[in-house]
Image (cartoon, helix red, strand yellow):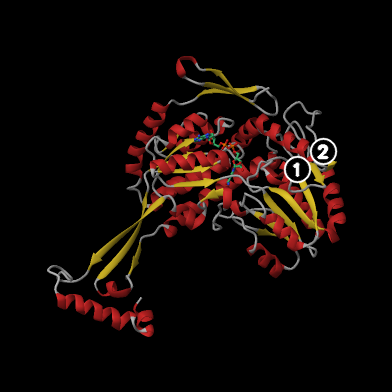
Amino acid sequence: MALFELVSSESGRRTYDVKSPVTLESIGQFDAASTAEVREAVDRARKAQREWATKSFAERAEVLWRWVDVIVERQDDIVDLVIKETGKARFEAIAMEVMAPCMQISHYAKRAAGYLRTRKRRPTGVMRFSKKLTLLYQPLGVVGLITPWNGPIALATNPLAQALMAGNAVVHKPSEVTPFSAVLLKELTVAAGFPEDLYQVVQGDGETGAALVDAGVDKISFTGSVATGRKVGEACGRNLIPVTLELGGKDAMIVCEDADLDRAADGALRGSFFNTGHYCCGTERVYVPESIYQPFVEKVVAQARKLKQTEACDGDVGAVFWDKQMDIIEAHMADAKKKGATVLLGGERNRALSGYFFPPTVVVDVNGEMDLMRKETFGPIVAIQKVRDEEEALALANDSDYGLSGNIWTTDLVKGEALAARVTTGSVCVNDISVTYGIPEAPFGGVKSSGVGQVNGEVGIRAYCHLHPIIIDTGKKARGGYPYTPEGAAGLQKLIKTVFGNRFLRRLFV
Ligand code: NAD
């Protein structure tokens, strides 16, 4: 049974039905917006943006603070809907889809004014005597936001809070797998007092997403798979608009020989099982030196056995959000078993429950020949590979097309930090699972195939702006004008020789 299905395409309008992965019952249907409707939404957003851009940071922040109030008041509605739509564990729905948005929105409501304040500078070099420089962070205009299904609220509120605080309007194409969370999100923004057309949702599939990229927006903020990210990046290149691509990962966990093994085992479970493993910076590969391999594996299995999976989603590990992801998880498991992997726990779909559930799984005897250790699995699986030592673990961690995040476990924090600097990835956490996305001050973004650009904090919000320099000549009369004369040229050469021909002066000058 498909959880997301085209049920009609009469007169060119695509209508989809969405089922809950928990009950397998229909949650509702939606129509994909046409190309013309997407363009109309962008036009309306552009009008709303002009007015919004005139508001001060304090005025914008006031609406964001009200948005937080509304989220807190309506948190049960958010949690219930997200569970219905995704089947994620209740605790995770609260932590990821309520707590994280409150933190993100509050952060930008409070700090955007500082991050984007106008800066006055004195230019360096010869210009310092005659010019003043003002740097203005101007909004880009209308931002097209395209999001995936694994964090239907949080992965929208983070870019949304930044884009709006920076003075932009946003047209959002949510995942077709979780359209109703976006309907609720829109409702919450209206209740908070955002102008009606400032944030709009256009429902639809990949075709609608592609239409948004081509609809005349001023930037695309995309979160999703590497394959789609490439297409979106190409289209943005063609349209000459900036793009941030937050893509998939295959994060490695390195357990050092001196690690606290109980803590590391717990970290392996949280890193691999959080959000049913549908976590872009979830732990997908665990490398453990042979000297600690056996006790580590025993602790992981013992702790994993205690975890609960329930149809009410009130346990530790929720449902698989989408049938297509179940197919990928099962295919990677089958490939691993065929190539010699040993399953110590779980390993097959949980048929005791009627929805789409894959149990907490622990697999060993894995290697880099297996899809489970090379491609993004996005499932609740701890895959542990025995290695000779930490250096081999590091080499294997870096041997990946992906580079989103990663984690290192050691009691020697100096060593941990040094090792972290040698992992070729977007960010690294020591003695914790990857929490980078949840720390707004930490720029988050992938290297290699995991993305382009960084979101969060100062770097993130500034990427929703054009940094506009204004240069003012402070002199009373024009300098350096026509006509050019031989004396003028000789004078310029003399100046170059005097200043840049002298090592001391050239440093003083710039
Ligand atoms: P996906 O790429 O299939 O879809 C993402 C979004 O893109 C959806 O809204 C989809 O409708 C839209 N889309 C599809 N084709 C398009 C096109 N041609 N043009 C424009 N839009 C198009 O990804 P998914 O399956 O929804 O999400 C899972 C992926 O997202 C995983 O790879 C995961 O790692 C990644 N992800 C990354 C981050 C991050 O911050 N790096 C966060 C969450 C998820």
Q: Is mark 2 within 8 Å of ligand 1?
A: no
Res. 371 mark? none
Looking at this view, is 503 or 284 the one in front?
503
Q: Position of residue 381 (x, y in %)?
A: 75, 43
Q: Give, as a three-letter code, the residue at label 2.
A: Gly
Rendered position, 160 above or below 328 = below
Which SS class for mark 1?
A: strand
Q: Is residue 481 left or right of residue 212?
A: left
Q: Residue at x 73, y 41 (%)?
A: 380
The 10 Å Cα crowd at callout 2, few under 14, some 14 to 19, many 20 or more, is some
Mark 1 or mark 2: which comes first in sequence? Answer: 2
Q: Residue at label 2?
A: 346
Is 484 on the left-hand or right-hand side of 289?
A: left
The residue that label 1 is drawn on is 381
- Position of 171 compared to 82: left or right? left
Residue 19: x %, y % from top left: 64, 25
